[in-house]
Amino acid sequence: MDDPIGRGRARLVEGDVEFDGRDAALLETIAREGSVARAAAELGRSRARALSRIETLEAGFGELVERQRGGHSGGGSRLTEAGTRLLNRYERLAAAVAATARVPETVLDGTVTAVDGELAAVQTPVGTVWGLHDGLAADDAVQVRIGADAVTVRPAGDDEPAATSARNRRRGRVAELERGETVHAVRIRVGDASVRALLTDGSAERLAIRPGAEVWLSWKATATRLVAGTNASVTHE
């Protein structure tokens, strides 16, 4: 059967830190305005939240914004070389994802086993998966839908990703690598099921992603949609 298709979302990941379109907008505006405060005001955000977000991003990607206080120039902010490179990387990825008409989703049939606030645990062919729900209850039959652009892939030789309900993680083996000009689609076997991911050409080379390679997969519970009912499945291929 054809792969389910979802809407692509460009993002860069370093460890547990993700850089997405909102972050790109923040850096772009800082570069244009020369000030975190003015950038935050233009974007309708508080200066404190903008600074906090920059600190979070810098914990994963290194120093991105150089800030100067006072002086007769009045101080200000500008992107570092690393910040400019990160923004350029993101813009290239965003353009590639936007040009990709078909962004596959993994769809797993499952049964809700527990509900914890806005998250629910679902027993699936790849084990227990956490995702966002809207009014589900234990024993409900659901589809678990995971966008390929939400899945992070790491070599199996790396340390095991942290185990929390906010991030799902699995170990698998690359079954197929469909190469695109900039973005590659990867199908990874996890037990009797498959999970799909998207990787840039550079990431695939850097991580040595090849058919047969063992890898860690992880994706956020908040990027996992739980849909009542079981009308389709791509769990067995």
Image (spheres, rainbow, N blue to C red):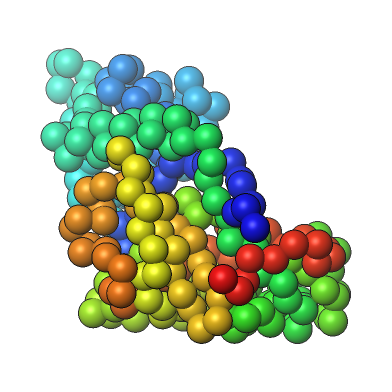
Pinpoint residue 76: horizontal percent, then vertical percent.
24, 24
Left/right placement of residue 77 relative to residue 124 reads: left
> Residue 4: horizontal and vertical position, in percent?
64, 52
Q: In the rendering, at what x and y percent does residue 23 appear?
A: 41, 38
Identify the residue at horizontal 63%, vertical 65% (top origin): 234
Q: Residue at x 61, y 46 (%)?
A: 6
Quadrant assignment for the N terminus: bottom right
The quarter of the displayed image where residue 36 is located: top left
Is residue 18 at least partly visible in the picture? Answer: no
Compared across the picture, whether 78 is left or right of 134 comes to: left
Q: Is residue 129 left or right of residue 117?
A: left
Q: Is residue 207 above or below residue 48?
A: below
**Is the residue 40 above or below the residue 224 in the image?**
above
User: Residue at 41% across / 45% down in the picture?
Assistant: 11
Quadrant of the drawing holding the C terminus: bottom right
Q: Quadrant of residue 171?
A: bottom left
Residue 182, x across and y down, in percent: 31, 39
Check the image and name the residue furthest to the front: 1
Q: Residue at x 39, y 63 (%)?
A: 176
